[in-house]
Image (cartoon, grey):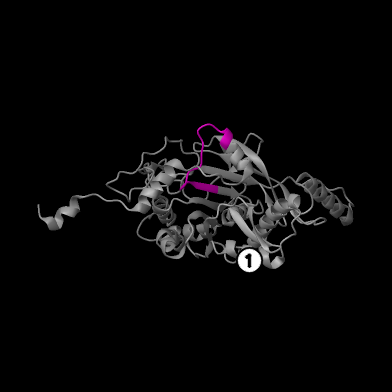
Amino acid sequence: MDPATLSDAIHSSTARSLVAQVRYFSSTPPTWIPGLDTLLDAAPNLHLHRGDLVELQGLPGTAKSSLLLHLAATALLPRTAHVPIADTVLAVPVAGKELHVAWLDCTPARFDLDRLAALVRHHLDLAIRRFRAPRGIGAPRDSELDALVDECMTRLTVFTPTSTLQLAATLRGLPRWASAHTADELGYVLIDGMSEFAWADQHAAATATGGPTAPPVRLVLDALSHLRATLSPLVFLTQWVFRPAAVLAHKSQEGLPFYAHHYPPSHWPSILSPARPPPPPPAPSDPRRPLDPPQASPPGPTASGRPAPPVPVPVPLALHLTLHPSPTPPLRRGTPLALLLSEQRRRVRVREREREGPGAGTARGAVGGTEGIRCVVRRPGGAEVGSWEIEVWEREIVT
């Protein structure tokens, strides 16, 4: 054999591909969403793995973006904060994930950086206060808290794609970008408002000439498959409910509706697809192979009326979260605004006492807050796992 071609017969794999395989098959990281983690711990044979895809769907104002902000804040926080107080440096346990977060904002000017920084600051302040209280140590200065927040925010990168094609290209380029620009591990990819491009994609498909073509959302799934086989971050994405009246026949255990999807089910994964056993690890000879074998979606009818062949979906959904707004209590006619605000302040005071005193949630007397948002979790196959309640407040998101 020619020595010059000897190396061609030797199969190789990159270290990144090997690490991605180990992460997927051995790592089941908590989300730090207490309600969701409790449901996952109690459900048999249900775990989130590195590289999994989780979809959030709900009506406007149901805390989808707020839930992503909570995920981002807990990922950006350090495991331990080194706080200079009274001529000494204290190692304060914060229990953050200390991971890099890629936020893909598909809706122009929707991402609220100030809100995320305020959430991070509140978590840090609360951790330091709880640490110093039994030790009689003074509180940190604002400048010291600002420095800690700045350090956390360096682990955040925001991308603003303006089309499905740009979204797919951004996802496809994340592994190469992360290797060149991030010192920390890329733990979360958060895609907010992916539905922003759905109408444009449907219009392009309806006006296309030359026969039907695959929608560009397929390229997003291909990019996610590549991302999964390289860096294996957890991916959370939000979808809107365009047609609230388009609900499925079955409801949740609490009688809450599930909504129809606005992307073609033959090109986008559905939580109603049957659950499958865990995929085998990729073959060493082909490091580019995705971690999951292609999943065939149910065929749909073609223009001629004949069933179309199944279209493989490279990345199935691991979980689907449907968020529902809190029920609005009826107001008695003639109820003064001052009475409503007083009742809201009373609920804030009760909540702060339950959560270890003032400062645990919103500022005492604040009136901003959304309570009682219900999140229903379904697993592959559509079986309901359970539900929990979310509260969105000025300085924290209680999950």
Q: Find residue 298 and report its image quarter.
A: top left
- On the question of residue 11 being in view, the answer is yes
Q: Is residue 42 magenta?
A: yes
Q: Residue furthest left?
A: 1
Question: At 78% from the left edge and 44% from the top edge, which residue is drawn?
Answer: 354
- Our reading of the magenta stretch's main secondary structure is loop
Q: Which residue is mark 1?
A: 147
Q: Indicate whether 380 appears above or below 229.
A: above
Q: Residue furthest top?
A: 44
Q: Position of residue 63 (x, y in %)?
A: 65, 52
The amino acid beneath tag 1 is: Ala
Which is nearer the eye, 370 or 197?
Answer: 370
Question: At 60% from the left edge and 44% from the top edge, which residue is drawn?
Answer: 322
Which is nearer the eye, 229 or 4?
Answer: 4
Q: Residue furthest bottom?
A: 143
Q: Position of residue 235 (x, y in %)?
A: 50, 51
- On the question of residue 113 being in view, the answer is no
Q: Which residues are magenta?
A: 41-55
Question: At 57% from the left edge and 46% from the top edge, which residue is drawn?
Answer: 31
